[in-house]
Image (cartoon, rainbow, N blue to C red):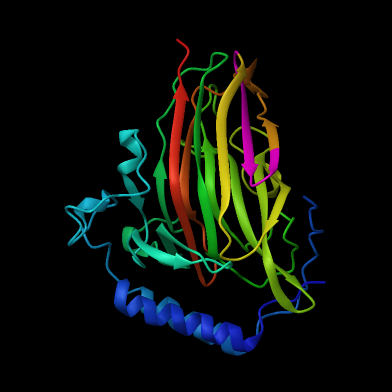
Amino acid sequence: MRKKLKLLNLKKHILISLTTLIFACSTEEVVLTDDTKPLPALYTSLSSALSSALTSCVQNAVGKKIYRFTELPGKANATDINKTTVFKTGDIDDRTCYADYHQKTITLANGSTKFVGVYKIAAGTQNQTGDPTQPRIERASKTVNTRKKGSFVQIEGFVTINDVGFVSDNYSNGDMRDDTGTYIVQAKGTHFNATIGSNDPAILLLIAKKRFENGSFKDYALYAEVITKRGGSGDNGRELVFIKNIPKNTRKKVVMKNYFKEDNQQWVKVIVDNKTKDFRIPNTKVTINGETKYQVGKQAKIRFGAYRCKGGQAEIYWDTMKQTYNEVL
């Protein structure tokens, strides 16, 4: 059984978050089941203090939802290391007032160092835009607007996970009702004959969750959160598929390919380190005005960075980003 965060670590974690706010507004391991022990009262009070402080924070340094790294103060001549050769990835979609996208040198678990792009978010920090969705800092790939065989977009790079969102609840990591975890990359794509869900729906998201062993933090469990029907969300429209456990502050290659394997049939391939999984995205049968129709994907794109934090903070590092694509007309 895994055990939720210990009181001492929780106190330290939240105090660090408050300090940061002031200054910056191949054998697979078995995934263990969660312990449902609630968080101590001190963590609840500290979380409340953090939430109260965040209500007064301001938008990012340039006051825009979408900006470029070179627009930030003092960065006019800087190099954005997470921007690929495709122009679109230079746009940073920042829906948090916690910390702007930035770059720094980190020390990895093996003692080596790496210069990385930093995506740091915290629970409740999306409030400056009035956005009811979860906080995020992400970049988007090119959008491929054809559903013919051979059309695809692919993002690859190296991810290092320093922290992810965490809450105490009664659900295991593999349960869709569990609110723990942070998305690090997601495949998106609109579809024909839409009836439910977002206007810009995700079809597969890679989420990282904390894993515990013998009462102590062990590593991060990565899952693919994949739709079971077009427009699906929550436990009635998505499911979690385990991919791989990866240690904290350990650099791993991640590849996501959003593609049409056949005409009108969308797939998403996920590679984490040495583990590969391919997912067939459903063409959902629906009835509209008495007629039977199918919800078929009509575009493919990818977003990467950090998205969703329902408790505490998340800090995801990306480096060595590449993007490839093909549109079959």
Q: Which residue is painted at 42% across and 29% down in the image? A: 143
Asked if the magenta segment contains residue 194, the reply would be no
Residue at position x 46%, y 36% from top?
200
Residue 27 in the image, given as x and y percentages of width and height = 80, 52
Residue at left 34%, top 34%?
Answer: 85
Instruction: Residue at the far front: name it.
Output: 112
Q: Tell me the quarter of the picture where residue 260 sits.
A: top right
Whole-percent x and y of residue 154?
A: 51, 32
| Magenta part of the chain | 263-276
Residue 79 location in percent, x, y? 27, 50
Please state which of residues 113 and 326 is positioned toward the viewer in this rendering. 113
Q: Quadrant of residue 75?
A: bottom left
224 left or right, relative to 120: right
- The C terminus lies in quadrant: top left
Vertical relation: 62 (above or below) 186? below
One can see residue 228 in this view: no
Camera sees residue 28: yes
Q: Is residue 261 above or below residue 271?
A: above
Q: Is residue 65 left or right of residue 185?
A: left
Look at the image and tell me in which quarter the N terminus lies: bottom right
Image mark count: 0
From this viewpoint, which residue is outermost toward the top? 329
Residue 314 appears at what percent x and percent y? 50, 65
Magenta stretch, main secondary structure class: strand
Where 313 sits versus 262, above or below?
below
Query: In this view of the protein, which residue sits in the foreground, 102 or 43?
Result: 102
Q: Residue 179's image quarter?
A: bottom right
Q: Residue at x 74, y 68 (%)?
A: 170
Query: Does residue 273 show up magenta in the picture?
Result: yes
